[in-house]
Amino acid sequence: MARTMTSDARKKDTREKIELGGLIVKAGLRYEKRALLLGALLDAARRIKSDEGERSRLTAIGVEAFGNDDQ
């Protein structure tokens, strides 16, 4: 039997999804097709798993975009 999420867990999950959607908007990708966004994210996930330098490079770009206020 599937376990149901508690109200607090659902709220946390919803908030996280909203924040992640905000990253798409902040990156200027609001109007791109979902398949392109998913493809780009999957590609990035593969690259950062196999290349620590790529992880560091992308993190630096993100930190700069946030204005160094969020990592």
Image: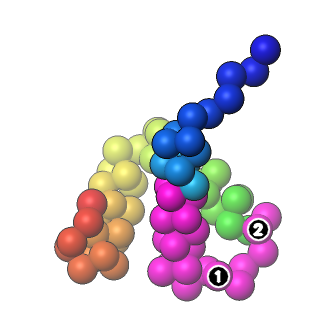
Taking the spot 34% from the left edge, 71% from the top edge, the residue there is 61
Percent across and percent down for residue 51 are: 41, 44
Q: Vertical placement of 43 versus 5: above or below?
A: below
Label of residue 30 in the image: 1
Pick the quarter of the image with the C terminus.
Answer: bottom left
- Residue 28 visible in the picture: yes
Q: Is residue 25 on the magenta stretch? A: yes
Estimate the spatial distance between the alpha carbons at disc 2 and disc 1, rounded to whole Å.
9 Å
- In the image, 56 versus 13, the foreground residue is 13
Q: Residue furthest top?
A: 1
- In the image, 16 versus 54, the foreground residue is 16
Question: How many residues crowd mark 2 within 10 Å: few (<14), some (14–19), many (20+)?
Answer: few
Question: How many residues crowd mark 1 within 10 Å: few (<14), some (14–19), many (20+)?
Answer: some
**Which region is colored magenta?**
15-35
Taking the spot 30% from the left edge, 55% from the top edge, the residue there is 56
Q: Is residue 53 left or right of residue 37?
A: left
Which residue position holds label 2?
Answer: 34
Numbered disc 1: secondary structure: loop
Percent across and percent down for residue 24 are: 56, 73
Residue type beneath disc 1? Arg
Q: Is residue 4 on the magenta stretch? A: no
Taking the spot 33% from the left edge, 78% from the top edge, the residue there is 65
Q: Vertical placement of 65 versus 51: above or below?
A: below
Pick the quarter of the image with the N terminus.
Answer: top right
Residue type beneath disc 2? Arg
